[in-house]
Image (cartoon, helix red, strand yellow):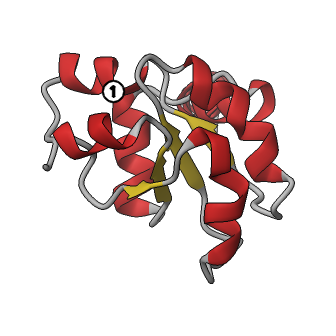
Amino acid sequence: MNFFTQIDNLALIALLLVSGIALFLPTLSTLISGKGLSPTEATIWINRRKAYVFDIRAEDAFKAGHLPGAKFAPATALEAEIGKLKLDRKHPVVLICENGNDSRKAVAAVKTLGFAEVAALDGGIVAWKAAALPLVK
């Protein structure tokens, strides 16, 4: 192999590493900072990672429309509601509220129940609707 072939190989390896890191950074930053998940990231967590989804809005708002598979767990009794369920603590949890503020505050409380990965949907149900994703009644 000549010198230029080795440089080409190193460039390809560097490109591979940089692109891999770029793809992983949004997930890593979400886990570290607890900022929240975009509707797309939440969909990936729900479909691929079998995340539990809890809607912490008022019951009438939940009945008006919620994410498919979401369980109602009011913010005032969130820990008690989740604690009653026999859930695998290895699965991630996605919390949903109206605009993302209440669910972001509830992340720490759910983590105390032993779930390793807990995140809030950034923008809440408003962002979900804006992304034209389905709701069930």
Closer-to-camera residue (27/3): 27
Residue lying at the far bottom in this picture: please name it.
86
Name the image quarter holding residue 93. Answer: bottom right
- Is residue 112 toward the left or the right of residue 74 in the image? right
Name the image quarter holding residue 125. Answer: top left
Q: Residue at x 27, y 46 (%)?
A: 67
Residue 103 pos. (x, y %): 59, 31
Amino acid at the residue labelled 1: Ile
How many marks are shown on the rendered structure? 1
In this rendering, does residue 55 appear at all?
yes
Name above or below for residue 86 compared with residue 58: below
Residue 88 pos. (x, y %): 64, 78
Name above or below for residue 101 compared with residue 32: above
Closer-to-camera residue (32/11): 32
Closer-to-camera residue (115/136): 136
Residue 112 pos. (x, y %): 86, 54
- Is residue 51 toward the left or the right of residue 137 in the image? right
Instruction: Name the residue tied to disc 1.
Output: 125
Name above or below for residue 123 compared with residue 114: above
Q: Residue at x 60, y 77 (%)?
A: 85
Q: Residue at x 49, y 21 (%)?
A: 122
Residue lying at the far right in this picture: please name it.
112
- Is residue 44 toward the left or the right of residue 9 in the image? left
Q: Local crowd at mark 1 within 10 Å, few (<14), some, or many (≥20)?
A: many
Placement of the N terminus among the 4 image quadrants: top right
In this rendering, does residue 10 appear at all?
no
Residue 74 pos. (x, y %): 53, 45
Closer-to-camera residue (12/20): 20
